[in-house]
Image: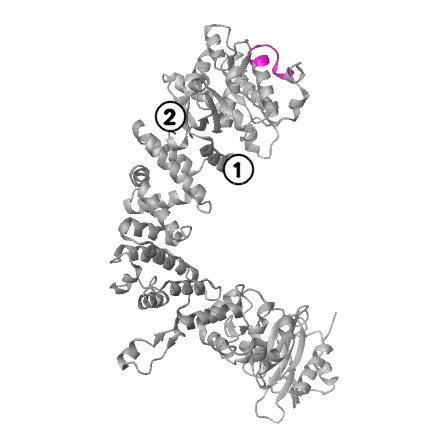
Amino acid sequence: MDIDNACAKASMITMGGLLGGGSNPVIPDMQRDYCWGLEKTTSPIEVHKCTLFVDGLIHIYKSTADSGGGPVSIGMLYGYEYPKGSGAVNIIDGQQRLTTLYLLMGMVYRRIPDTEVGHAYRAYLVSETADGDVMPRLQYQSKSEAMYFLSDLVSKFFLSRSGRLSQIEQSKWYFKSYDADTNARAFLGAIRSIDAAIEKELDRNPEFDFEAFAEFLVTDVTFRYFDMGSRSAAERVFITINTTGHPLTLAQNLRALAIGLVSEADAMSVAKRWNEMEDWFWRHRSLSMDAFLKLAIGLQASSAGKPDEAARTFLTDELSPVFDAYARCVECGVDMANDFAAVPMLRYLLRFGDRARNCDIERLGHLLCNYTRYQKTGAADRQQASDLVSRMPTPDIVSALDMRHLPAKIINDEERAKLQLLRDCNFAPALQSLLRRGEEHPMLRGRVAKVVSWCREKDAEAEPRRRQARAGRFSMEKLAYYIDRIYEIWGTDIDRCDALDPVRRALLALRHRAYPIVRRGDMVLSLCWKDYDWQRLMTDAPGIVRQLIDHTAHMSLDELAARFSDVEYPYHFIISDPGVLDGCRKRQLLRPCAPFIGIYYLQAGATQWWVEGRRLHIDKDRWNAPKPHGQSSLQIDHSTLNATVALVWEEGGRCRYRVELFRRAESLRGKVDLKEVADNLKYPMRYDRATRRFSVPCADASRALKCVGEVLRAFACD
C-alpha cells in the first residue's frame, strides 16, 4: 500500500486468518533475533517469557472453554504487505508472540491424531508448492540459517510426528552451523519450554483435549493487527521499537486507537492525517511526537476535567487543530520542547487562530521561553501564563501592557521594559535581533533591561513632563555597542577560570564596593569563579559592568590594571601580581578585616593571608582555617594541641600589631607547654594574668608575620 493513499487500518485478526489462505507472515531482515526461547540471557525475565506465555494461553483456554469460548486478544501486531498482493505480511512488532504461537501450534500438531482435524490443521503450519515441497507459513528473512532451520524443524519434526525432542541436535538434518545461530538456539529453547508446559498440564489433566486446544489457537487467539501501509512507515516504528527492545510508543498505540474509534469509511482519512503528523515529526527529529500527544491530551484534560473523555475527544475531534497550532509555533521559531511555554502557546493559537500573525506568535513564544532562563517556574507561574493568554485583548503581546491587573510575574519589570521599548520603536527587526543576542549571553541570561537603560540619551530640550516620563531618547547604536563589548570582554563561556583573570583584576582596579561579591554570608567573598557568580554580579551590580566597559573603551584590561597605583588598597597585591589569581587556584577570599585579606586553600591544603602586601602561609593540615575574630584580629586554631595564635591589629597605636598565644579551652590541657613556646621565641612573649594570654607587640606587619611564623613552627609536630 502507498502511504499517500492512506489505506492503513486496524482490525482484529486470528491466527487462522494470518496463517490460512494465501497469506503468510514474514519476519523481515530489519527485525532483531527471536529471543524468548534463549536459555542463557542477560535478563532473567526473558528466560521465563516463553513458559509464562504458554501457561497463560492454556489457562485462558480452560477458563473460556467452561464459559462457551470466545475471542481472546493478545495485543497489537504491526506489519505491512510487501510486495503488494503477494500475501506476505512483514511483521514489525509482535515477532516474539507470533513466533512462540507458531512453535506452540507445531508442538500441538505432533499430539493431534491423523484425522480430518489434523489434515486441516496442517495447512496452518505449511504451504505446499506445485512440486510437492512444503514451506513454513512463518518465514524468517532476518538470517538464512534461521530460515533453513525453521523449514527443517517444521518438515522433519512437526509434520513427521516422529523423533524425540532430545534427539533433534543428533538428527541428520541438523547442521552444526545451527549451533552458532541465535534464532535456531532460541527456537530449540522455546519448544523445550513448550513441551515442558504441555507435560505439566498433562500431569494435572491426562485427558487434555489437544484438538479443541488447536482449534482455540486458530480461531480464538486474536491480534489487533495494524497495517502500516508501507515500508517507510514501518521503518519509523521499527527504529523506536525493534532496535531498542522497548514497547510501542504512545503515538503508535494512540494511532491504532484513533482509527478504531471511527467508522470504516472514516478510517482512511484518519490514517492519512496520522501519516502526515508522523512525517512532520520525522522531519523535525529534535521534537517528540509522544511529548506532543501528552501535552495535547493534558491540555484538553485540564479543561474538561475528565482525562479519559478528553483524550477520546482529542483523538477524534481536536487532533488536527491542536497539531496545526503546534506545527505553526515550531515554524515561527518557538521552542515547543520548553514545557512552560508549550501549553500557553497552544491555548493562545487555539483562541486566536488565524488572527495571530507569525510575528505575534514569535514574540509571545520568545517572552515565555526567555522567562524560564532567569526564573524557576512553578504552578503559580504556569497559571499566570495561562491567564495572560486567556485575557489578552488582541493577539499582539504588547497589548498586554494595557491590561488591568497585569500578570505581574510573567510581565515583570524586565519583560515590560522590553515590550515598551519594542512598541516605542515600532517593532524594528534590528532591535528585536539585538535584544535576543543580548539575552543569549550567559552572563545576562535573558535579562537585558538594565543594559537597555544604559542606552537612553538625555534630551535637555525636552519638556519637563516628557523628561519625567522617559529618561531620554533610546539609542540602538549604544545597545549594539554594549552588547558587543560584553561578548568581547567575557566571551561566550563565562565558566572559564583562567581566561577571565584579566577581567577580575580590572574589576578590582575600579574599587567598586560590590566586587568581590559576597558569598556565604558576610565571611566569604568571590572573584566570580563560576557562571552563576557573574550572573549575580550583573543582576546585583550592573553599574560595575558598565563602568568596566566605559573605562576600557580606549585601553585594554591589562592596561587598566597596570595603571592602578594605590598601595593602601587591600587588593593591590592581586591587581599588581597576575600570578596571585593563578596561585589561589580559583578559591574564595575571606572578607577583609583591615588590613587582613585571606584566600582559602592554596596549593597543597594551605591558606594564604596578606597583611599589608606581605604573605603568611598556614598549613591547613595542622591548623584550622584562619578566620577573622571580632573586627580586628585573625585567629588560627589547632584543636589537637589546644592552642590559638591571634594576630590583632590596633589602629592608631605606636605598635600597630600584637601577636597572642592562648588555649582554645582553658579547661583542657594541650600537648605543648605554651610558656615554653613563648619563652623560646626570638621576641619572647609576656603573660597577662587578666587575659590569660601570652602576647608580644609588633611595630609593623613584617615583624608580626615573622612572629606568627615562629609560633607556628614551634608547634610543628609529626
Tell me whether the residue at label 2 lies in contact with that at label 1, contact meaning CB atoms closer than 8 angstroms: no
Kindly identify which residue carries mark 2.
11
| Percent coordinates x, y for residue 60 in the rendering | 43, 22
**The C terminus - image quarter:** bottom right
Residue at 56% in and 13% down = 158
Above or below, comparing residue 237 to residue 498 in the picture: above
Q: Is residue 21 magenta?
A: no
| Percent coordinates x, y for residue 13 in the rendering | 40, 22
Of mark 2 and mark 1, the one earlier in the sequence is: 2
- Give the camera-side residue of 471 and 641: 471
Residue at 60% in and 32% down = 41
Above or below, comparing residue 652 to residue 263 in the picture: below
Residue 151 sits in quarter? top right
Kindly identify which residue carries mark 1.
244
Q: Amino acid at mark 2?
A: Ser
Residue at 41% in and 74% down = 454
User: Helix or strand or loop: what does disc 1 sit on?
Assistant: loop
Q: Is 520 on the left or on the right of 260, as rendered? A: right
User: Helix or strand or loop: what does disc 2 sit on?
Assistant: strand
Above or below, comparing residue 550 to residue 229 in the picture: below
Q: Is 74 on the left or on the right of 380, as rendered? A: right
- Give the camera-side residue of 132 and 251: 132
Q: Is 479 on the left or on the right of 700, as rendered? A: left
Residue 66 sits in quarter? top left
| Percent coordinates x, y for residue 250 in the rendering | 41, 38
